[in-house]
Image (cartoon, rainbow, N blue to C red):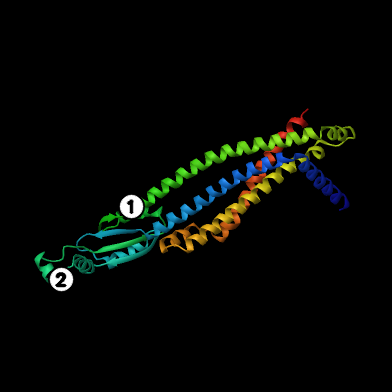
Amino acid sequence: MLKFFTQFDYLFRETLLGLRRGGWMNWAAISTITVLLFLFGISLQSTWQLERLLNQFGSQLEVQAYLETGFQSADLKPVVEAIPDVVGVTPVSKEEAWASLIKDLGVSNIEAATTQLKGNPLVDELKVKARNARAVPTVASQLQQVKGIDEVRYINEAVIRLAQINAGLRWTSAFVIGILTLTATAVITTTIRLIVLARRREIEVMQLVGATQVWIYLPFILQGAVFGIVGATLAWGLLFAIQRFLAELAAQQADFVQFLAQGLSLTPQQLIILPAALVGLGTLVGLMGSLLAVRRFSLR
């Protein structure tokens, strides 16, 4: 146990000493990785939020299934409810649909209108709700195969556009994050190399007394991890502050804006995953940069 604490104390002191030797280069590395993780966090949040909006809008979409003459909506309701991804079925008889249409047209005498058209020209209808936006086209396709259903209609243009925006955002974010990851890795590599060069005489002395490469360069590797963790903390703080600001701003706006804000808020699970992802990516980038830096010296 004493040996463990001695080793831990050595790594801790050497890591802090290296950070002090880094000076302003430390902040260059931390600021670069903070920008990377901030944009990564925004990208991850945007993906989650667009997915939720897609599901919210998709759940509001109704697939309208018009039946063939002679079929009744109440009889087909159990059949449609058995279709996967269907969460709600509302049967509408042709009498109800006709009465609603006459009311919308402003006709006061429904019997006269029915007589003039020689009967009710409408058919029974089923209003079907899908589980989410992605399931709407599948549900519509399965409805068309049900015996007794003549025509299926649904409007999903907004959902399609949101899905396209989400896909474009993912590709753009992946490209930008990839470029920033390379930049952050290069900055951390340069910073660690400068710190190693500043302590080269100490390293030479350690090599002469028999210190292993692992114990010589492990503190420098840990410095890269510290850069990543500090950058992740700063990025999470910025994201959290922006989230709170937008939530307070939306609370003072109209109901529609509040509906959007509710859709853009993060779930408790996502509030755990987001900082964990930031710390994980930050630590990984920091370790990659420091490993690249010390590899050059350790192979000499």
Single out the mark in the foreground, 1 or 2: 2
Q: Is residue 125 above or below residue 171?
A: below
Q: Amino acid at mark 1?
A: Ser
Please tell me which residue is depicted at 76% across the width and 36% down the height of the picture: 195
Please tell me which residue is depicted at 16% across the width and 68% down the height of the picture: 107
> Which element carries disc 1, helix, strand or loop?
helix
Q: CA distance from mark 1 to mark 2?
A: 35 Å
Numbered mark located on residue 141 in the image: 1
Numbered mark located on residue 171 in the image: none
Name the spot of residue 300 as percent of width and height, x first: 78, 27
Name the spot of residue 63 as percent of width and height, x first: 32, 58
Among the 4 quarters of the image, the one containing residue 130: bottom left
Please tell me which residue is depicted at 81% across the width and 45% down the height of the picture: 11
In the image, 129 versus 267, the foreground residue is 267
In the image, 264 versus 297, the foreground residue is 264
**Crowding near the residue tagged with mark 2, few <14, some 14–19, many ≥20 C-alpha atoms within 10 Å:** some
**Crowding near the residue tagged with mark 1, few <14, some 14–19, many ≥20 C-alpha atoms within 10 Å:** few
Q: Is residue 178 above or below residue 100?
A: above
Whether residue 204 sits left or right of residue 35 in the image: it is right
Whether residue 101 sits left or right of residue 25 in the image: it is left
User: Seen from this angle, which residue lies furthest right?
Assistant: 209
Q: Amino acid at mark 2?
A: Ile
Q: Which residue is mark 2?
A: 110
Q: Is residue 244 above or below residue 32?
A: below
> Which element carries disc 2, helix, strand or loop?
helix
Residue 84 in sight from this viewpoint? no
